[in-house]
Image (spheres, grey):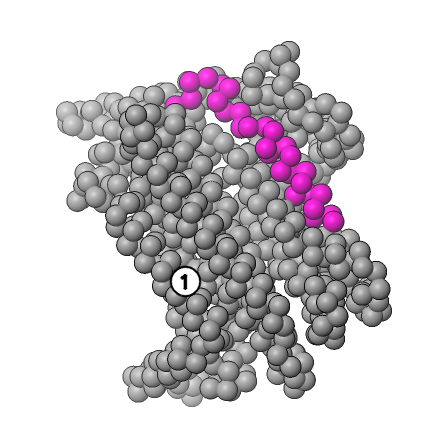
Amino acid sequence: MLFELNSASLVEWSRWQFAMTAIYHYMFVPLTLGLSFLLAVMETMWVRTGKEEWLHATKFWMKLFGINFAIGIATGLILEFQFGSNWSNYSWFVGDIFGAPLAIEGLFAFFLEATFFAVMFFGWNKVSRRFHLTATWLVFAGANISALWILVANAWMQNPVGMEFNPLTARNEMDDFWAVLFSPTAMNKFFHTVTSAYTLSACFVIGVSSWFILKKRHLEFARKSILLASVFGFLSILLTIFTGDTSARDVTRTQPMKLAAMEGLNRGQEGAALTIIGFPVKDAALPSERMRSVEYGIAVPKVLSFLGYHDFNAFIPGIEDIVNGYTSHDGKVYPSIPQRMANGRLAIEALKTYKTALEENNGLLAQEALETLRENYPDFGYGYLSSPDEAIPPVVPVFYSFRIMVGLGLLFVLLFVVSWWYAKKRKFHKFRIIPYLAIACVPLAYVASQCGWIVAEVGRQPWVVQDLMPTNVAITRIASGWVITTFWMFALLFTLLLIAELSIMFSQIRKGVKE
Amino acid sequence: MKTFIILLRLFPNETEIGHMLKCLWNIYRDGFSHLPRWGKMLMIIVVAKLFVLFFVFKFLLMPDYLNNRYTTDEEKSKHVLNELITKP
């Protein structure tokens, strides 16, 4: 029974497996991205001033960075394994576009890890100070450039541009590398993700330093670390908010259903309000079971319209508008989902006809089918939906995740300001609530990061590639029992790795700074 | 011409590449041989993890579906094309 092919179960388990491994993988990534910058700054301070305290600080944080890096390294490969085994239709369909950024990422990662990382860790007293410093900065640059390529690939799935579908190979082929790299979605995603990773790293440094302050150990080291991290964190969270704003405008245009789900917005409005807090609940009066009514909502008038178009009176479509068709604030007409489903079916039928016509050497028919396919290709994926309801993502997790992410982001602004102020005044230890808050913000920063990914990835359901490929088409038809088995194996492996990371890291933090 | 020669000097020649690789090897060798206890533990975890990832998962449990069943790109295209036109 377990190994029978059950399509619904297979899709769900494949999704859960990918989500679980991505969540675990992303527990290691953000600290690598942000802490490498702080290390490079601390080491620069040491090289410029010659003060030994900066050297001790660099070595201490580098140790924690190394533990996180070593445990996290290659965990992302599991996601690539899954593309090949569980998502073979998807990986073939996007192969050329996904392949190029991932290959560049692989090369960067290899050279980074093989050379500069080794110099950074083992090169103390073996290479000159400046060469060592260069290696540390290159580790930071390499890690962040590596992230760029992964995020470009992810952004293409949210907003597929710069490609053409080849019906002979069943692949999307890249015809404009720069359009893929510099699409607004890619740029927003990259800067929003890395700046939020810097924010998390700043929370980590302040949290660990706060522990030292509570224990009355390494007080000057902790104070300096807090000062540096709070400035870095404050600038990072400002950039995260700014790129969140640009991302909102991009999502409004490219993924309006995601925006409507984030807000639980069922009917479109001019001057739409942004819900600060509320409770999305089932409502029998709504036309779809997937829709939710937001009850006890507290909202700020017109702010959602402003976020979407920088115009307080702009029209923001709700789920019903997107299902029934609407004209956007910038005048673009979007057909209804049933119409797009019809277009998609035409495209799929045309692909079938094209294949048959080629086999029968019927050039005229093949040409006609190709034209129909190209004309309807933007709605290709809708042809696989069996009802318009399927185009609606799960509202509840997206709604809550968005609010948790934003709420925690605002808490971090407060943390950075308060931490900087009290560390500067050397009063950090006098108000014990501040170090406790800082320690609590370490796990909360991880929660905020993961919520951001839930908004991005659950919010775009049912699409693996926006409008072109739904999740149930992307999967490999293998026995669901196999996916369930590997799901639990991954869960065990990652849990063990996380326990190992935390226990080694805690033991090294307890040992403290070598002075 | 002078600028060109300076630019050329930026790229290492064979002897310099050999020297750099030797230095890198020495850094690795000395680094690993002087690892503290927790570092050795970390290395054991890394090696065990890589073994599980590549041997157990990649080769035994999660082989690439298309590469495992088809040898040419044409066959893979045909398979995916059929999936695209027959999926519900």
In the image: residue A335, left or right of residue A56: left
Above or below: residue A396 compared with residue A88: above
In which quadrant will I find the C terminus of chain A?
A: bottom right
Please identify the quarter of the rendering in which residue A18 is found.
Answer: top left
Residue A216 in percent (x, y) is at 75, 70
Range covered by the magenta-colored residues: A384-411
The disc labelled 1 sits on which kind of residue? Ile
**Residue A437 location (% of width, % of height):** 74, 54
Q: Residue at x 67, y 58 (%)?
A: A203
Residue A301, image x, y percentages? 78, 31
Is A437 placed above or below A221 here? above
**In what element is the residue under mark 1?**
helix
Seen at 54% across and 83% down, the residue is: A130
Q: Is residue B20 above or below residue A317?
A: below
Is residue A410 inside the magenta stretch?
yes
Name which quarter of the figure residue B2 lies in.
Answer: bottom left
Name the side, left or right, on which A136 lies relative to A201.
Answer: left
**In the depicted view, which residue is nearer to us: A6 or A512?**
A512
| Residue in the picture at 65% in, 49% down | A444
Secondary structure of the magenta portion, mostly?
helix
- Residue A90 vs residue A272, the one in the foreground: A90
Disc 1: host chain:
B
The residue tagged 1 is B45
Is A498 positioned to the left or the right of A270 in the image? left
Q: Going 62% across and 68% down the picture, which residue do you hit? A: A510
Query: With A339 as the anchor, is A83 left or right in this view?
Result: left
Q: Residues within 10 Å of mark 1 (few under 14, many from 20)?
A: some
Looking at this view, name the residue that lies furthest to the left: A360
Position of the N terminus of chain A, as image quadrant, is top left
